[in-house]
Image: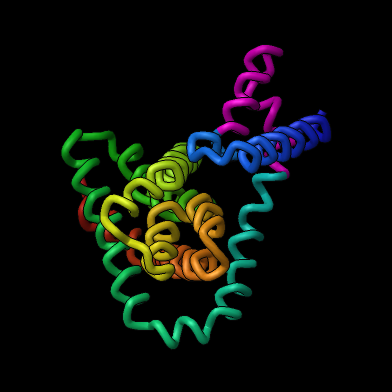
């Protein structure tokens, strides 16, 4: 049964990717349509989430390895990091601050339960890091992954319209915006713009994850100590 769900996930994703390449609409991002298709299949055939995860967990386990593997493109782009260190520092720094501040404002404004609030705050970090941050801070890892996906999908779908409306055209600005706000899903979208945008997005996503991992637990401990 586990092999069936692994195969199902791969087939659905490849099919949705082909559909996206053919139609090229932000609303048809493979991550969105694949998740929707799998949910529909599970509901139609009355499969539970636990049953699906007998195979899905093996794909999930690869996320951690994928994050570690980001060290390689980061190393490959080291010259770009040095050359554009100032805009990268300012862009990534402002992105991280904005993400953390708006997250705390949101969870305090609507007075969420502490565990749910902690699960929301790592929304702008790639899923494995966000789930680990939620775990060590007292949140709910599975819920954190949901908010990560929401942030990633919304950024990839709305990003082209937002960047166009504010006049961001330089590849560094585009890459930082997607990498900082929408992690892996945003990076996949940035690659559609070009290799340079994808590289900068990868740098932004990786550095953001590292910095978030260092400062977010302390920020949660200080600001949510109730």
Q: Residue at x 32, y 49 (%)?
A: 162
Q: Is residue 158 above or below residue 50?
A: below
Task: Out of 68 and 166, give the one closest to the viewer.
Answer: 166
Q: Residue furthest left?
A: 109
Q: Is residue 186 above or below residue 196?
A: above
Is 82 left, or right, of 50 in this rendering?
A: left
Q: Is residue 59 visible?
A: yes
| SS majority, magenta | helix
Q: Residue at x 55, y 63 (%)?
A: 194
Write the start and end of the magenta stretch as one range.
33-58
Q: Position of residue 43 (x, y in %)?
A: 63, 15
User: Is 51 inside the magenta-drawn segment?
Assistant: yes
* Quadrant of the rendered image containing residue 77: bottom right
Task: Out of 95 and 165, give the one closest to the viewer.
Answer: 165
Is 206 left, or right, of 16 in this rendering?
A: left
Q: Position of residue 205 (x, y in %)?
A: 47, 63
Q: Is residue 90 above or below residue 102?
A: below
Q: Position of residue 143 (x, y in %)?
A: 45, 37
Query: What is the quadrant of the C terminus in the image?
Result: top left
Q: Residue at x 49, y 49 (%)?
A: 131
* Quadrant of the rendered image containing residue 144: top left
* Quadrant of the rendered image containing residue 38: top right
Q: Position of residue 18 (x, y in %)?
A: 69, 39
**Badge count:** 0
Is 165 left, or right, of 43 in this rendering?
A: left
Q: Residue at x 38, y 43 (%)?
A: 158
User: Is 75 inside the magenta-drawn segment?
Assistant: no
Q: Is residue 108 above or below residue 188?
A: above
């Amino acid at each position: 049964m586990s092999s069936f769900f692994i195969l199902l996930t791969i087939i659905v994703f490849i099919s949705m990717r082909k559909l996206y390449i053919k139609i090229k609409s932000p609303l048809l991002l493979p991550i969105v349509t694949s998740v929707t298709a799998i949910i529909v299949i599970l509901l139609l055939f009355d499969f539970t989430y636990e049953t699906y995860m007998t195979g899905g967990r093996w794909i999930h386990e690869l996320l951690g390895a994928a994050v570690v593997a980001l060290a390689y493109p980061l190393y490959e782009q080291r010259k770009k990091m040095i050359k554009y260190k100032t805009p990268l520092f300012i862009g990534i720094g402002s992105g991280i601050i904005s993400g953390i501040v708006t997250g705390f404002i949101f969870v305090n404004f609507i007075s969420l339960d502490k565990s749910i609030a902690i699960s929301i705050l790592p929304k702008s970090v790639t899923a494995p890091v966000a789930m680990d941050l939620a775990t060590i801070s007292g949140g709910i890892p599975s819920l954190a992954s949901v908010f990560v996906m929401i942030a990633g999908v919304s950024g990839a779908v709305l990003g082209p319209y937002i960047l166009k409306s504010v006049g961001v055209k330089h590849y560094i600005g585009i890459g930082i915006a997607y990498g900082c706000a929408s992690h892996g899903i945003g990076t996949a979208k940035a690659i559609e713009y070009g290799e340079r945008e994808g590289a900068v997005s990868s740098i932004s996503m990786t550095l953001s994850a590292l910095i978030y991992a260092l400062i977010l637990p302390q920020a949660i401990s200080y600001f949510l100590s109730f």
